[in-house]
Amino acid sequence: MADLNEVKENLSMTDLTLSFEVHQPHRLRIDGVKEDAEDLYDRYFDDEMNEHFFKDVAENCYFPATERLLRAARELEGTENELVVNFSISSSWIEQAEKYHPELIDMLNKFPEDSIDFIGQAHYHSLAGLFFDKEEFRWQINRHRDIIEEKFGVRPQVMTNTELIYHNEIGKVAAEEGYEGIFTEGAERILGWRSPNHAYTQPDFMDGEKTSILLRNRELTDDVGYRFSAEWWSEYPLTADKYAAWLDEEEGDMINLFMDYETFGEHHWEGTGILWFLEDLPHEVADREDLQFRKVREVAEKEPVGEFDAFEYNTVSWADQEMDASAWLGNPMQKMLFEKLQELEDKVKDLDDPEVKDVWRKFLTSDHLHHIATKTMDDGSVHNYFSYFDHPHQGFAVITEHIMDFQQQVEKKLRE
């Protein structure tokens, strides 16, 4: 009878993964190429701007949010429902943290071992996953995996491609590179009537190894990420106990909450109560018998309930209303620059210069093309919010100047 009760308890339990995207790009020099720079990186990238943005977000978000999560993890350590947080941290964020606030790395390493997990991604948060040839993408996801293991002592077993960009071939690469799971958006056009609160897998016609596909619950995540401080929202104000009750009412065997870490203190300022919400939520969830915090690697072990078939021309992401690749490849300016960066791959690798390859990979960071989207309405507002350019066409001019100069530098080195 005891075994039967245990089975019933496990059947009623819903696994909750709480995951955060932590990223800062290397920003380009708005005033153009610095021709007298001492190295190639300084020729194109503006570290003064990088430092300004990083330290500003650190003060508003990184420090206060991490302090609250760390405190909650320690308070719940040893209880029946310990807090578990999952971080997807870009290698460009790590580089800047080590330069401007290395104590942030130390804070992440102070979490109790069972209360934290790390998610793999593409090196420098790049768009290499959209390349026709996936060789560079394979290198990047393995490079990032090594960096995470080096900095945090944990080797990721679940990955997400940049901005949850996904199609079947990306899932196939993840499986072939040894990942047990990959995150993407629970887009309705793929799911149909099905719930995002289960594990899925690649369709049968995809040859070779398969991996678990974990889906972000968009509605519940956006209740915090986008609607938390919206006074027009019928559920405003959102409290931790109300939100935990919503989670408790969800059907399925998992709920995957995946949001930008800057939600807490940057996108929603401290005055909105967002940091108090973050501090209270772990305790509200812990008090509910049917919810259990989990590492992403644990839910990736669940048996898939069906297939998630996203072919290449139906690419999924978490961006904008379309939830596709149009945030980065939606206009001719973006497509031209993406094609140019892809064309440069062979020349960069023929040169085999570590500095040149590193700069080229920083150009592949998704933010650059995101900033020159020309969408309107709510999506346009999101792109403008994140951009440091006055206008997408200014961004296009700046990025084009840098990339064309970079091409000239590469070709010059090849002739030497």
Image (spheres, helix red, strand yellow):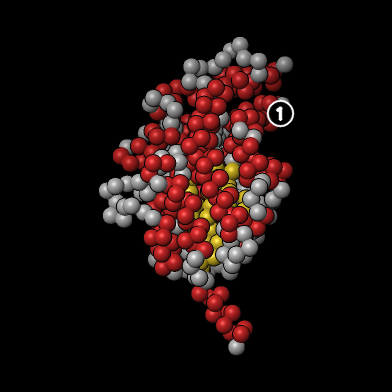
Q: Secondary structure at mark 1?
A: helix
From the viewer's perspective, is residue 228 above or below residue 214?
A: above
Residue 272: x percent and y percent? 38, 44
Image location (x, y in percent) of residue 7: 58, 79
Residue at the bottom extreme? 1
Above or below, comparing residue 409 to residue 116 in the picture: above
Residue at left offset 48%, top offset 41%: 262
* Circle count: 1
Percent coordinates x, y for residue 92 in the rendering: 60, 35
Extreme residue toward the front, this view: 75
Of 15 and 271, the residue lying toward us: 271
Near mark 1 (Cα within 10 A), the count class, few <14, some 14-19 or many ≥20, is few
- x and y percentages locating residue 388 in the rendered image: 44, 28
> What's the amino acid at mark 1?
Pro
Nearest the viewer among 162 and 115 is 115
Q: Residue at x 59, y 67 (%)?
A: 80
Which quadrant would the C terminus be assigned to in this image? top right
* Direction from residue 3 to residue 191 in the image, left or right: left
Q: Is residue 392 left or right of residue 70?
A: left
User: In the rendered image, which quarter contains the N terminus?
Assistant: bottom right
Q: Name the residue that disc number 1 marks.
A: 354
316 relative position to 88: left or right: left
> Height in image: 121 above or below 34?
below
Is residue 111 visible in the rendered structure shown here? yes
Q: Nearer the viewer, residue 102 or 409?
A: 102
Q: Residue at x 58, y 49 (%)?
A: 70
Kindly tell me whether residue 202 is visible in this rendering. no
